[in-house]
Amino acid sequence: PREKGWRTPYIYLFQGFWCQPAEIQAISTFQNHFQAKDSDVFVATVPKSGTTWLKALTFAIMNRQNHFISSKNHPLLSFNPHDLVPFIEYTVYGKHDKVPDLSKFHEPRLFGTHIPFGSLPNSIRKSNCKIVYICRNPFDTFISSWMFVNKIKPPSMPTLKLEEAFEMYCNGSVGFGPVWNHMLGYWNESKERPKNVLFLKYEDLKEDVIFHLKKLAKFLDCPFTLKEESEGVIENIIKLCSFEKMKELKVNKTGTFGRNFENKFLFRKGEIGDWTNYLSSSMVEKLSKIFEEKLYGSGLKFRVK
Ligand code: A3P
């Protein structure tokens, strides 16, 4: 089955989720060839849920021995987080049917992905590698996605109207959707294998980033030492990866993500509740009902403002 896409004329149902033809090719190659290592780390997300932020935080935590956080040469000051933590489906396996040479990746390898849990290769699911997942309340995720797509869509694609995009989001037919299934896949796995899958929410990180940064470091088996805490390493990572700091960096103001889009579009408002400026009360009611129904019994809930 195929449906109208946001960024490409059509998206296709593949293994229970919707994606673009190029993504299907990349994901298939990944599924057929990737061999996970126990030391691998994946940052997995629903698009527009805080991927850029979580990639930056995870990179900073994992590489803090080699890259002193307050150094003027820190890679996060001159590279976009998506360059430092490459996407499996766009960058690493993005050459379609070509199998990439992964020997240039130093261990522990750090990758990003939007692939739903159920479609990760068996070797990941069977290995001891770690997956950090972040999602965000569906209202903000929807508005963030809709705005982003209209900024980066090819000129050949018409402007996407809010109402039309909303219907597609509610039907589940958006990239890597249905979004509720994406969340539930990782949510359930995080309950089954808490040592391997850490489930985070954008709103929680915003509310208490120190607490969640410590949790993330512990999960990654590199907890902050008392010495690091007293030296302000945690605060420095938070500052380095903050929306305000990242948005103002030259690389993020003028750089591009491959040939796909300008990095500046990755940093819009970075707030909780911007949806209140766009969604009508009937839209809010409809989307709330869908998520209530789909997440029923799972224990997964969101703060929306
Ligand atoms: P808004 O469009 O609501 O502003 P992703 O990184 O998954 O594409 O998600 C993009 C959303 O995260 C955007 O939300 C963007 O502004 C926000 N964002 C980007 N960098 C951030 C950061 N360092 N801290 C908090 N939010 C960030």
Image (cartoon, grey):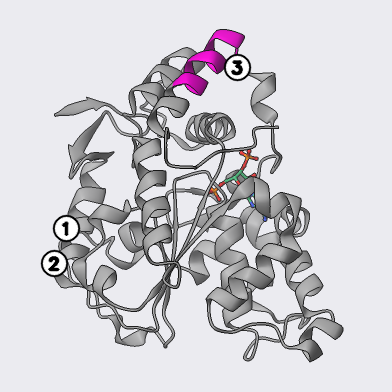
Relative to 220, residue 10 above or below: above
Q: Residues within 10 Å of mark 3 (few under 14, many from 20)?
A: some
Task: Look at label 3 and name its amino acid.
Answer: Leu
Q: CA distance from mark 1 to mark 3?
A: 36 Å
Instruction: Classify mark 1: residues with Cα within 10 Å, few (<14), some (14-19) or many (20+).
Output: some
Does the magenta segment cover residue 281? Answer: yes
Return the mark for residue 279. Answer: 3
Q: Where is residue 33, by image quadrant?
A: bottom left
Name the foreground residue: 242 vs 160: 242
Disc 1 secondary structure class: helix
For the point 58% across and 47% down, the residue is: 266
Earlier along the polypeptide chain: callout 1 or callout 3? 1
Residue 32 numbered tag: 2
The span from disc 2 to disc 3 (Cα, nearest Å) is: 41 Å
Amino acid identity at mark 1: Ser
Q: Is mark 3 within 8 Å of ligand 1?
A: no
* Residue type of the residue flagged with mark 2: Asn
Q: Position of residue 132 (x, y in %)?
A: 48, 64
Q: Assess whether residue 293 is covered by the magenta stretch.
A: no
* Residue 139 spot, x, y in % from top left: 56, 29
Pinpoint residue 15: horizontal percent, then vertical percent.
Answer: 18, 45
Residue numbers of the magenta segment? 280-289
Instruction: Give the labeled residue for mark 1.
Output: 28
Q: CA distance from mark 2 to mark 1?
A: 6 Å
- Secondary structure of residue under mark 3: loop
* Residue 277 sits above or below residue 87 on the image: above
Q: Earlier in the sequence, mark 2 or mark 3?
A: 2
In the image: residue 213, left or right of residue 165:
right
Q: Residue at x 32, y 51 (%)?
A: 116
Name the front one of labels 1 and 3: 3
Q: Of all residues shown, which one is farthest toward the front? A: 297
